[in-house]
Amino acid sequence: MNVSKTNVGTKFLTCILLSLFFAGCLGNDDKKDSAVPAPLYAKGKARFEGICTGCHGVDAKGSGPNPPLYHSDFLMADRHRPIRIQFLGLPNKVDTATTIVVSDSVFSGMQMPDIGFCSSDSEIAGVLSYVRVTFNTATDFITVQEVASVRDSLIQAKILDTTGYAARCAM
Ligand code: HEC
């Protein structure tokens, strides 16, 4: 009788410990995803898979002259520079260096196009938020307002030239 009671007790305890363990794992994942509002995360994921993977890879680890977005200290060092890169490409009028160092590796010789030129603020906020939390350690997100204010200041400074918008972005 005593033995079976102990068995039940042990099973019960194991169950609780396992539940706590799995709850802990799920909890972490939830926390990562919930750092970004769901619609923004979904938009960013779709944009990453549709556009960025072509050069940066499906795992975001980059290849050849295309640097990684995965564990990128360059990406995480500054909130505004990645927004600028979406509008202006890289190198650009502000970030003029033709050689960059991303997580101890040197990249040069290939220019990233200004793929965000025709994109909305939420598309850019979404994709940057997605790569920051999914492939890096961010627990916050890039807001639509932040992207809008970077866009405005680039236009004010005549760095982002919107005269080409109508022709390039019609459709
Ligand atoms: C046509 C290829 C191409 C596409 C598509 C592209 N990139 Fe890039 N990207 C590059 C290259 C090349 C560089 C490095 C440029 C340099 O060496 O100055 C770069 C650099 C970067 C950097 C800074 C370096 C780093 O690794 O952190 C970020 C951030 C970035 N890209 C984000 C994106 C995002 C987000 C997308 C999708 C919306 C995207 N890129 C799509 C080619 C591309």
Image (cartoon, rainbow, N blue to C red):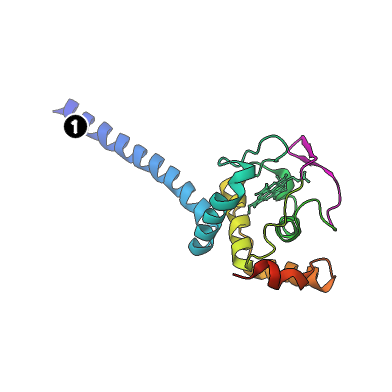
Drawn side of residue 144 relative to residue 102, left or right:
left
Identified at 54% across, 62% down, the residue is 40
Which residue is at a point 56% across and 40% down the rendered structure image?
59
Question: Which residue is at a point 59% across and 63% down the rendered structure image?
Answer: 123
Most foreground residue, 112 or 7: 112
Q: Position of residue 103 (x, y in %)?
A: 73, 38
Residue 116 image point, x, y percent: 67, 60
| Apparent side of residue 145 relative to residue 150 in the rendered image (left or right) | left
* Disc 1 residue crowd, few under 14, some 14–19, many 20+, Cα 10 Å: few
Left or right placement of residue 15 versus residue 107 in this view: left
**Could you tell me residue 20's position as x and y percent?**
38, 42
Q: What stretch is highlighted in magenta?
A: 94-110
Does the stretch in magenta take in 60?
no
Q: Which of 169 and 25 is in front in this view?
A: 169
Identify the residue position indicated by label 1 in the image: 5
Q: In which quarter of the image is residue 55?
A: top right
Q: Does the residue labelled 1 lie within 8 Å of ligand 1?
A: no
Note whether 31 is above or below 69 in the view shown: below
Q: Where is residue 141 in the image (x, y as percent from the top left)?
A: 61, 59
Q: Furthest residue to the front? A: 167
Q: In which quarter of the image is residue 158?
A: bottom right
Residue 107 among those drawn in magenta:
yes
SS at circle 1:
helix
40 or 94, which is in the foreground?
A: 94
Q: Using the rendered image of the protein, determine whether residue 162 is visible from the camera's viewpoint.
A: no
Counting every numbered tag in the picture gives 1
Q: Quadrant of residue 3?
A: top left
